[in-house]
Image: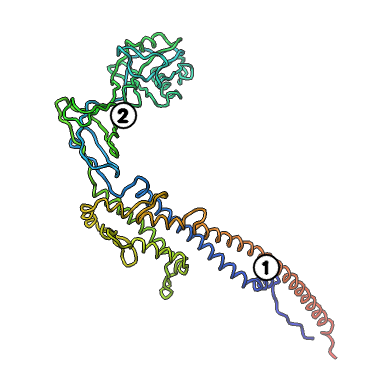
Amino acid sequence: MASITAPTYDPTTTAQALAQKTTAAIQQQITDQTNAATATSKALTTLKSAISAFQSSLGSLTGVGKSMLAQSATLSNTSVGSASAQATAAAGSYNLFVKQVATAGQVSYNVGADATIGGSLNIQLAPPSSPVTTPPSPGTASGQFTVNLNTAADTDKDGKLSLREIAAAINSEPTNAGKVSAGVVTLNGTAQLVLTSKSTGEANNVWVGTGAGTDAALAGSLDLSKRNVTVKAQDAIVLFNATSSTTGTEVKQASNTFTNIDGVSLTVTQAQAATDQPFTLAVAGNNSGTTSNVQAFVDAYNKLKSAVDGLVDLGDPTAGTKGGTFAHDAGVRALQSRLVSMVRATGSPSLASYGITAARDGTLSLDSTRLTKQLAVNPTGLDTLIGSASKSSPSGVAGALDTYLTTWSDSAKGQLQQRTDATSKLQKDLAKRQTELDAKYDAAYQRYLKQYSQLQTLQSSMNNNVSMFDAMFSNDKS
């Protein structure tokens, strides 16, 4: 008897193949849409970052109180200090004389043997009383703090306080907060406790007193009569509008940095001799600094444009070059076009008149020579042209750019936020559809697995029956 021939197959593999075939079309659609949504999300992040960086640059270059014009401050006598000018500083020349520079107070005490534990140090920062040798009244100084010489100060636990342990206790005292630094200096075999105020000015003279219970020898070493002033704390004194070392308007302050001239910072480092002549502080335009500011504007714009160009690039299918995520997005292409038109605005003066020109593709470049020549003719015109990215009163090219870009970057209703929200919603919907499709696949797989498992069992049973019949009738010769 002939046997039954049937194809062999694996129910699991067959069920998987059939289930995949059932969901393949929808799965491909979801996969394509998910990949596109992911690419869009990444592209939106790139665009958001590029716009944010450019707006930050605009703010730092042209925000409130900012200017593209740079000013410089130079001293005719650089040995007395240095000066710098903000863009807002007015050009001018000032005669000055440095009578005195501010110093931080420093005192030292010769301290002998280690001290017994106990007592306290009362340290004050204050100007000297009259006479100079008289310490300020206790509690009258704002810089006053107390250092406890208790067991916590005995870091090596030998039962005594060394000079270094006392200095460490002063430095680590929380209420000191760095107002006074303590150190140990050994000169000719004698150890000295040296205390230095952090800040300059005559109000920062250092005074030390001792509290009840302090080691007698230590208290004696810190007595007022043993106080050695190594650096006298004093204020800085500068004569403005000076014609000699004795004439002019005296300005006295604790700091060595003077800001009396609007937009100018003068830091003095050395006093002049009485026989010296006043020096000149000159404030004038700084073409090099202005060029750097303009170049920063150009670079920031080009960086933004480059990012947008990459996102809308059409690519080249013939060369296998893939296009940008927003290659066919009318909104982002409009952004690209608008940016270029804003920097190509015509008028008098124009960006081009200051050496800022746009190439055919809209990329900016700077001709520093042309910029310098135009600054000589019309220095204030540059700020008027570039304007301000101030949110309250935008003006010029910077204001127009920032205002337009805000319609994209606004966190509440800007286009970037709207697009991001829409993309996020799409991604959530796609994730839900994927979950539903996975359930549909599982159901189809289980159904096919059951059917083909049953078919495999039936086929096996039929083959067994055929084998049995073959065995029963194989010896029948009739």
* Location of residue 134 in the rendering, given as x and y in whole percent from the top left corner: 33, 12
Q: In this picture, is 91 found above or below 456? A: above
Q: Quadrant of residue 10?
A: bottom right
Q: Quadrant of the C terminus?
A: bottom right
Q: Residue at x 56, y 64 (%)?
A: 34
The residue lying furthest to the bottom in this view is 478
For the residues labelled 2 and 1, the Cα–Cα distance comes to: 78 Å
Question: Residue 441, which numbered label?
Answer: 1
Graded by Cα atoms within 10 Å as few (under 14), some (14 to 19) or many (20 or more), the crowding at tag 1 reads many
User: Residue 100, located in which quarter of the rendered image?
Assistant: top left
Helix or strand or loop: what does disc 1 sit on? helix
Question: Circle 2 sits on which residue?
Answer: 255
Closer mark to the observer between disc 2 and disc 1: 2
Residue type of the residue flagged with mark 1 = Tyr
Asked whether the viewer can see residue 77, the reply is: yes
Q: Earlier in the sequence, mark 2 or mark 1?
A: 2
Quadrant in which residue 271 is drawn: top left
Q: In percent of the image, x 47 and y 67: which residue is there?
A: 329
* Residue 186: x %, y % from top left: 31, 19
| Type of amino acid at the residue the image marks with label 2 | Ser
